[in-house]
Amino acid sequence: MLEQTPLPATLLAVLLLVATPGSTARAQVTVHSTDGYDVHISTTPTGILPGSMNCPYGYSFQVELTYEVTFTGPGAPASMYTLQGSVGCSPASPTFDLPNTPSGGKVNSVGAWRDASDCTTATVGSLGCDKVFVDIEGPGITMRTVQVPFSPLPITLVEFGATANAGTVLLEWATASEKDNAFFTVERSADAETFEAVLQLPGAGNSSAILHYSAIDRDPLPGLSYYRLRQTDLNGTTTVSDMAVVEHRASGTFAVHPNPWFGGALELPRNSVGQRLEVRSAAGALRHAAPVTATSATLPELDPGAYQLVLIDPHTGARRQCRLLRL
């Protein structure tokens, strides 16, 4: 089920999606020196940091940016003389400093003033912070100002969370802005490393309002699970959020023998006869399912690794789990 409703203005936390390889969220400019080396600069505004969340008459703000500076080619110096920039926000142009040496990370601009009362919903897009300029000077590079191109991140994610609820897991997230957003994919993992898609919901396309989304995983993994949100742009570019962790308590556990398992027959509990046995990967993908007709079962060939065995009572729906290690 998909819901899109405004979030309360008191929701303050802002979490930005992290661009995955191949994303167009960051571009760079290259400055050529007369000494034979090049300086590569990338900067991307990623968030607005209001100085106050109560702003009836206006507020001061900073722009948070990610950056990366590299030197390549023969004769590259250890440092530039000058490396600083400004962000073209409307109407302000807050400035920021970059290290003069090759480096990368995050930096905040100096404070600027906005004569508006939108401090709780301010984003890079809503404040028009869509241009970045960098002043550079160094050996073989005369003082100049270059514009660093970038494509804004497709969405600003305000929150993403997972909550166990009566045998299901409720997934909720909110966006403060969306640009060319095609759809969201909820991905799940049992080990925080191998993820698999479990749900997909359409995005709003383009929006500058705060939108609230929710969906339900009706067949969650037993025990601890990790969820993350993958956003797909209209051109196929994807970004992925941080993980949300949730614990789904199954009805109980059971044991099998041998465990670790090297193949061959697997001994199940006596009270498992008549139930349904599922074999799932660490990410929750179903690998095998069959009714239990005897206390000894033969599983299909499985690659080495960890698996989840689940016994399901067909009458009550009660579930029991067991972690199986395949060697």
Image (cartoon, grey):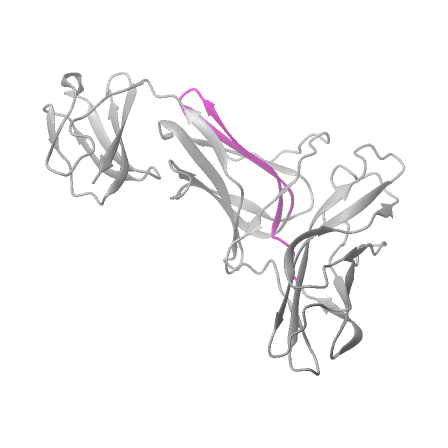
The front one of 47 and 205 is 47
Q: In the picture provided, is 83 more to the left or to the right than 239?
A: right
Q: Is residue 153 magenta?
A: yes
Image: 275 above or below 135: above
The front one of 236 and 37 is 37
Residue drawn at point x = 35 percent, y = 39 percent: 283
Residue 151, can we see it?
Answer: no
**Residue 71 placement (x, y as % from top left):** 63, 70
Q: Principal SS element in the magenta part? A: strand
Residue drawn at point x = 19 percent, y = 22 percent: 275
Magenta highlight range:
150-177
Name which quarter of the figure residue 152 lies in: bottom right
Image: 277 above or below 327: above
The front one of 199 and 122 is 122
Residue drawn at point x = 58 percent, y = 47 percent: 17
The front one of 123 and 324 is 324
Q: Is residue 34 magenta?
A: no
Residue 228, can we see it?
Answer: yes
Name which quarter of the figure residue 209 lies in: top right
**Residue 193 placement (x, y as % from top left):** 40, 43
Q: In the picture provided, is 250 more to the left or to the right than 102?
A: left
Residue drawn at point x = 74 percent, y = 79 percent: 140
**Residue 29 placement (x, y as % from top left):** 66, 70
